[in-house]
Image (cartoon, rainbow, N blue to C red):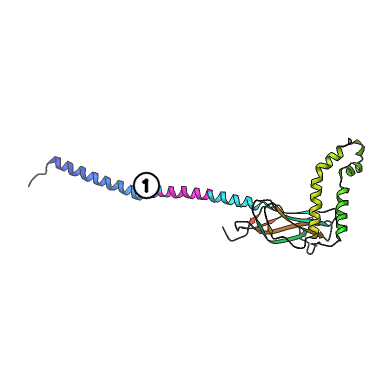
Amino acid sequence: MTNTPTWLLIVQAAASISTTLGVLIALYVAVIREPRKASEERKRHQTEMDALNRAEADRIAAQARKVVPSCLRTPMFGNTWWTVKIENVSNAVATITAVDVAAIDSSGIVVPNGCQQSNNTMPVSEAFDKSIRGALSGSLQGGFNRAGIGGMIPSGMTQQMANQVAPAVKQAMQEAMIGHFVTEWQRTLGPNQSALMAYTTTDPNLKLRITIDYEDEAGYQWRRTDSSQPVRIDSAP
């Protein structure tokens, strides 16, 4: 029986150890390192996608907030008169799909039949006369006089202050007049356009609440009540 040289046994053992080590390294790479690397890569990619989705959601929500419904009293026509307004202050077109105006009491409870559209309920001359008298009754000098301090205001100061207020007064008059003669809601609002409608309540203590459904330029659909945050109502996630 031939004895195997010691050096050959050492070489064979080393080769066996090397092969086993190589197999273990290959198993580690295949079973642990590569899946872990792939998982980390997927997590990084998902994190990036989530960040992009959040940025896009923030962008479209910011655009949606630029369609603003509001209800303002119009005392120049009477204590039950209101101007209801939908304003698009964005740089894109908005499409109004539904408008609901309701009267609410001091507790926020809807009062059935508590309000109605009031277009063309008074002659043009009367509406214009009321708007002018309403604006004049709220003039600065008249207010100072009623407060008993008219003589304390320096000469020219009242007119200077009135000139600063005049644009706001003119806008309120213009919107009240337009709202009085509009018979239906404008459905498409371009950038910086608005739609107006006049309403009256059955009781001067009631307030108005407006809820609108609208679609932005990208096709997203929203619902908004007064100045609350708009809410997505389409089927998109």
Question: Is residue 78 among what the camera can see?
Answer: no
- Camera-nearest residue between 84 and 13: 84
Residue 9 screen position, x and y as percent: 16, 43
Q: Main secondary structure of the magenta part?
A: helix
Residue at x 87%, y 58% (from the top left corner): 125
Which residue in the structure is indicated by mark 1? 33
Specify the segment rendered in magenta: 38-51
Asked whether the viewer can see residue 184, the reply is yes
Extreme-bottom residue of the structure: 113
Q: Judge whether 181 appears above or below 36 on screen.
A: below
Q: Would residue 140 appear left or right of 218 to someone viewing this image? A: right
Find out whether residue 16 is within the magenta segment: no
Assess disc 1: are there few (<14), some (14-19) or many (≥20) residues with their C-alpha within 10 Å of its C-alpha.
few
User: Which structural element holds mark 1?
Assistant: helix
Query: Residue at 84% of width from left, 42% of height from top?
Result: 162
Q: Nearer the viewer, residue 46 or 6?
A: 46
Task: Name the residue at the front extreme.
Answer: 125
Q: Position of residue 230 (x, y in %)?
A: 66, 54
Instruction: Give the residue type at disc 1.
Output: Arg
Q: Is residue 51 left or right of residue 23?
A: right
Picture quadrant where residue 215 is located: bottom right
Residue pictured at 39% horizontal, 50% vertical: 35
Q: Residue furthest left?
A: 1
Q: Position of residue 171 (x, y in %)?
A: 79, 50
Q: Quadrant of the C terminus?
A: bottom right
**Which one is in front, 178 or 11?**
178
- Give x and y (percent) for residue 195: 73, 57
